[in-house]
Amino acid sequence: EIVLTQSPATLSLSPGERATLSCRASQSVSSYLVWYQQKPGQAPRLLIYDSSNRATGIPARFSGSGSGTDFTLTISSLEPEDFAVYYCQQRSNWPLTFGGGTKVEIK
Amino acid sequence: QVQLVESGGGVVQPGRSLRLSCVAAGFTLSNCAMTWVRQAPGKGLEWVAVISYDGSNEYYAESVKGRFTISRDNSKNTLYLQMKSLRAEDTAVYYCARDARPYGDYHYFDFWGQGTLVTVSS
């Protein structure tokens, strides 16, 4: 099973700041890495697929990069609605696995 | 407008069974791979099971293999998760979700239901 490790667990930032979230895989997942956003009481929302492709309707301030085992989700300038938990997911191997999440909170 | 609505959750005793349903609207279920993902209270996401778009393949997490069965009734545009021999650790919100692209098995998910809570407790 591929283990995804997200860091940091919590990121405390102010609106307007840049957020950099990391997801590291225990073995290569090529570019088959996906990012989701989840707000309290809501279902996850697809942000980025295959490392760097924004899903439909996702603002350009969200970007993804990486390949192999190291991936990054960047939010260029945090908006109030971006404070949430972010999960990565690999679709390279069975079983599908998720990272433990990074909470982006208001400083 | 794409919608997924789960139902069937509730409180169930350990060892008992439960069947979850997920009714799809706004798209043709038979064109898409579908999955179940769960989230224990205050915890992260855990993938549970997936069924391929043509129904020919099913995959399960080790934690539920042999106890859970994913299926679909395309005539009713409904996805199911039959859960047997339930354990306390199966307590979670269960989400159904749609594969992001039709006619293939891409295994990332663009529409999610709002979830149904399953509580396994005596």
Image: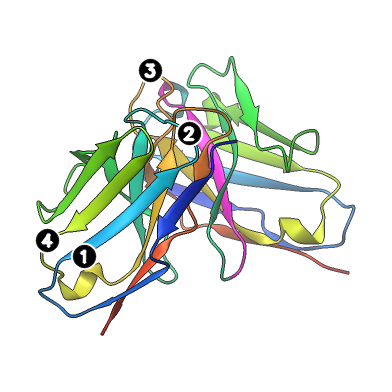
**What whole-number distance in Å separates the C-alpha atoms at marks 3 and 4?**
34 Å
Check disc 2 and give the amino acid type.
Gln
**What whole-number distance in Å separates the C-alpha atoms at marks 4 and 1?**
6 Å
Q: Which residue is mark 3?
A: B103
Check disc 1 and give the amino acid type.
Ala
A68 over A5 or under it: above or below: above
Q: Is residue A33 left or right of residue A78?
A: right
Q: Secondary structure at mark 4?
A: loop
Q: Is residue A92 left or right of residue A46?
A: right
B31 over B107 or under it: above or below: above
Q: Secondary structure at mark 1?
A: strand
B6 over B61 or under it: above or below: below
Determine which quarter of the picture holds residue A78. Answer: bottom left
Q: Which residues are magenta?
A: B31-41
Q: Which residue is mark 2?
A: A27
Where in the figure is residue A74, as x and y percent of width and height? 20, 55
